[in-house]
Amino acid sequence: MLSNTGNFLLFINIFLSSLTIYSSLKCLKIKNNYIFKNIYQISLLQSTLVLICFFTLTAAFIVSDFSLITVYQNSHSLKPLFYKISGTWGNHEGSLLLWVIILTIFSFLFLILNKNHPKNYRLYTLIIQNLLILGFLLFIIFNSNPFSSIIPIPKEGLGLNPILQDPALAIHPPLLYIGFVGSSIYFSAAMASMISNYSGSLFAQSIKSWVLISWIFQTLGILVGSIWAYYELGWGGFWFWDPVENASLLPWFAMTALLHSLLVLEKRNTLYFWTIILCLMTFTLSVTGTFLVRSGILNSVHTFANDPSRGIYILIFLSLMIFASIYFLFSKYKPTNDLINSNSKETFVLINNWFMMFYLITVLLGTLYPIFTDAISNNKISVGPPFYNSVIIPVVIVFLIFMAIGPQAKWIKNKFSNLRSTLLILGGAIIINFAIVYFLKSYSLISNLILISSLFLIMSSIFDFFKKSRLSFPRIISHLSFGFLILFIGLNHNFSVEKDFNLKLGEAKKIDDYEFALLDLKLSQENNYKAVVGKLEVNNSNTMKRKILYPEIRIYDNPQTLTYEASIQTSFLGDHYLTMSNIDRSEYYNIKFQHKPLMIWIWISVLLLSFGGFLSLFKNAKNN
Amino acid sequence: MQKIIKSIIVFLFIFVLLVFYNSLNRETNYSTDYLVGNKLTNINLKSFDDNKIYTSEDFQKSRYTLINFWASWCAPCRIEHPYLMQLSKEKNLKIIGVNFKDKKINASKFLNELGNPYYYMAKDTTGKQSVNFGIYGIPESILIDNETIVLKKFVGPLNEQNFNDIKEIINSL
């Protein structure tokens, strides 16, 4: 039943998408500035139906309708309700449906919220967005249909991968999707802008809110993903430069660059083609990332199942997007004479863009290089954290300094009137840095420079805040929180403590300042897993603090999987992080203990960063 | 000039997309198949009783050598053991057993119970030496000739088919 409803809705959506394109083309031929009323209606109906289609799938997950292959493969009747619901998008087919929802709703909202822009521009955006929607709908129906049924109907489902059964991961995909699928709307708008010759600051205004929305959600999506990796993967890190993480970071760099170049386009009416390139690049990178993780070229938790036909489809789609973009760019490109003073806000914004492009290219190379060497020379290599750290970290230092100085610069022509206060702040940053190093006794040149430059950015931002000149408040928040982010990552990295040892029940061990004792082991039976819960006492002889931690070894039933759950005690000063794993044929347990200072502040900084984006979004909405 | 730049950009994208296409049809799992046909160098294995180091020279004495990686705690190793016992009777073949991340006492017990098919016994307690052989799980076996060139690699326990393949190769001359 649900299978038929879902399939029917999918076909209706294909029809509506085609109808939108047809009506828009017809409307384009009429020379006035009104868009047919029925285009609005079709668009609204389309959004409603795609939502109902999605809820149909959710319903199938809730009632455990195993006649659908997707439900059978990714759910189980004993799974908690929350994870049944999140299971809807916790698989390849369902997540594609989420793609289409975002494409469709953004298309509708862009249509109704941009009424003061020219008709042709809006209609072309609608047409291109609907071509994207059509592409994904066809992909769903022919290759990855979530409503495919299975006969005979299985009695029980296979269950959701236990490491995906987690509140953070339940919200991670929707957040990230709003981010990078949302970027589709300014891909379409950029194409439409070239086709309809609608350029300049008005174009910038029409997409600014959309860039902000996608940027905010992309930031939050990446944050939630890292938090999940931090407590679920049990390694105590939060960023591993894994190709999948990189895939989410690449569009983020492009979006951040775009956000800044839009400022110039809006205020000074230059950098139009560069902005267009960034718009096109953001969504292209998003689809590239999707291709890499879904096709199975890269192995990760995101590779739901290996199916080369899937990859071929996305690859064809990607190629069409790229060549259409290139075609329009080349045919519309006119060399412009953008005169930009080397000491002006425009230059500083461009500097931001150079840095973003540098990061983007570095991460892109690191991610693609192994694929290329494998394809060309059969050589398996892996590019890991040492590459990224050594290339990116030194550059971050310079970047932070520009980030502090840049916003104070004036448009057109700037004068460095506040050199004295800048030097004063720099001096302050250096003193604080050495105080930190003196009290906490750790030293390396690069980490000192990181601390100094991030402190410099933080203090400059705070200083800007009190100046109350024409500097924008959302900008201060975002730059300030980015400074905090790098500062806390730097401190966390430098002052983390890690201990790795084996312990058996009743045994105690003293390592440096810490004393560990495994007090108890309990077996507990939960709804969908059994767990061995350890009770560990950690005493710090320095601070005289005593902590009790309860790490778990979980044995999930469906599918049968063993996972190690870290026990984490979070405080504002730092996290105590402990994992326990069993050792084969031994009564000993391997214990990995870490003290990670200021961990929570890293998360808070990123939250604050996206909050800056929210403020900017409100400000932008108010201004327009 | 502009034309050249444009063509370079288009060409670059075509190249990237072609590489992507090519990668789609590749084995994504870490594969050590490339070892086949290559010469094993830097062989340096400690003997089971610690009193000798085996190097490439030791492998050149026999026409064929099968290097078998095993451990007492590995259940599939028990399954393939009868095939190894049969292969140990072959004239042209010597079997080297590399005891992988194991305890000596357990390993000896295992061989006492099921029989010892190994001409040489080596060990790799830390699992590091095995990396040179491209081993990422056990059991695995590598068939080499007297010039230490890898002829065939068997991932997982040997089965009837593998057993026949090995017999065919070593009796082909």
Image (cartoon, coloured by chain):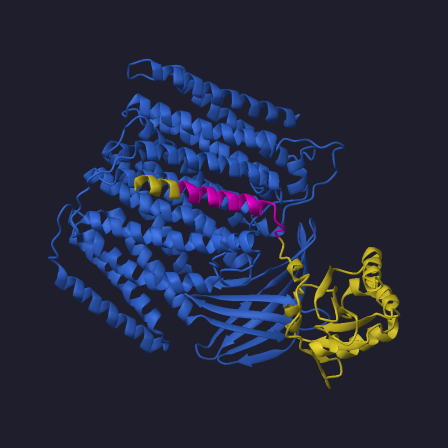
Chain colours: A blue, B yellow
Measured from the top left, where is residue A62 in percent x and y? 62, 36
Above/below status of A133 relative to B1: above
> Is residue B18 shown in magenta?
yes
Q: Nearer the viewer, residue A67 or A356?
A: A356
Q: Nearer the viewer, residue A159 or A245?
A: A245
Q: What range of the chain is rendered magenta?
A: B9-28
Above/below status of A549 relative to A43: below
> Is residue A35 shown in magenta?
no
**Measuring 74% from the left and 37% from the top, which residue is drawn there?**
A154
Which residue is outermost to the top? A30
Q: Nearer the viewer, residue B170 or B68?
A: B170
Measured from the top left, where is residue A442 in percent x and y? 37, 76
Above/below status of A494 relative to A418: below
What is the chief secondary structure element of the magenta stretch? Answer: helix
**Measuring 10% from the left and 57% from the top, which residue is drawn there?**
A417
Above/below status of A419 relative to A501: above
In this rendering, would B128 be left or right of A192? right
Quadrant of the image containing the N terminus of chain B? top left
Quadrant of the image containing the C terminus of chain B? bottom right
In this rendering, would A383 be left or right of A394? right
Which residue is outermost to the bottom? B51
In the rendered image, which quarter is residue A600 located in?
Answer: bottom left
**Measuring 41% from the left and 15% from the top, which residue is drawn there?**
A38
In the rendered image, which quarter is residue A448 located in?
Answer: bottom left
Q: Is residue A451 visible?
A: yes
Q: Is residue A572 visible?
A: no
